[in-house]
Amino acid sequence: NLNQPFPNPFNPTTTLSFSIPEQSQTSVKVYDIKGNLISTLLNESMNVGYHQIEWNADSYPSGVYFVKLDAGEFTQTQKLMLVK
């Protein structure tokens, strides 16, 4: 489960929290409004449980972004809004 990022809208950092029910290869990636991959925040095997990471978007322009969690067979996407 990928929880709603907090804060959202944000400037320039937001916290992304998620939980996974079983150990799996997990990735958290950020895409721009056009669907281009702009940042890979995480790409590793993760243990069961609750995790959180922070995204610092200081070097990116204001706009809408999408964060995508892939954990094993599970995929979920959330919308983010960076307001500078």
Image (cartoon, helix red, strand yellow):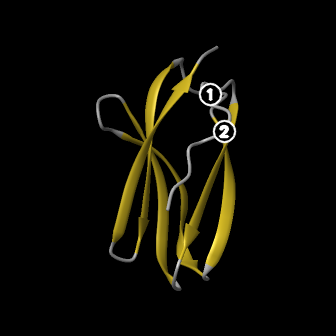
- Check contact, mark 1 vs mark 2: CB within 8 A: no
Quarter occupied by residue 73: bottom left
Quarter occupied by residue 10: top right
Alpha carbon distance from label 1 to label 2 = 19 Å
Image point 36% across, 69% down: which residue? 74
Q: Amino acid at mark 2?
A: Phe
- Label 2 neighbour load within 10 Å: few <14, some 14-19, many 20+: some
Closer mark to the observer between disc 1 and disc 2: 2
State the residue position of label 1: 59
Q: Is residue 29 left or right of residue 57?
A: left
**Percent coordinates x, y for residue 59 in the rendering:** 62, 28
Q: Is residue 41 left or right of residue 77?
A: right
Secondary structure under tag 1 reads loop
State the residue position of label 2: 6
Q: Residue furthest left?
A: 34
**Percent coordinates x, y for residue 2 in the rendering:** 51, 56
**Percent coordinates x, y for residue 64 in the rendering:** 44, 25
- Label 1 neighbour load within 10 Å: few <14, some 14-19, many 20+: few
Image point 36% across, 62% down: which residue? 75
Q: Relative to 15, is 8 above or below?
A: above
Q: Is residue 42 left or right of residue 53?
A: left
- Mark 1 or mark 2, earlier in chain: 2
**Percent coordinates x, y for residue 15 in the rendering:** 68, 45
Image point 58% across, 68% down: which residue? 19
Image point 62% across, 32% down: which residue? 57
Q: Which mark is residue 25?
A: none
Q: Amino acid at mark 1?
A: Ser
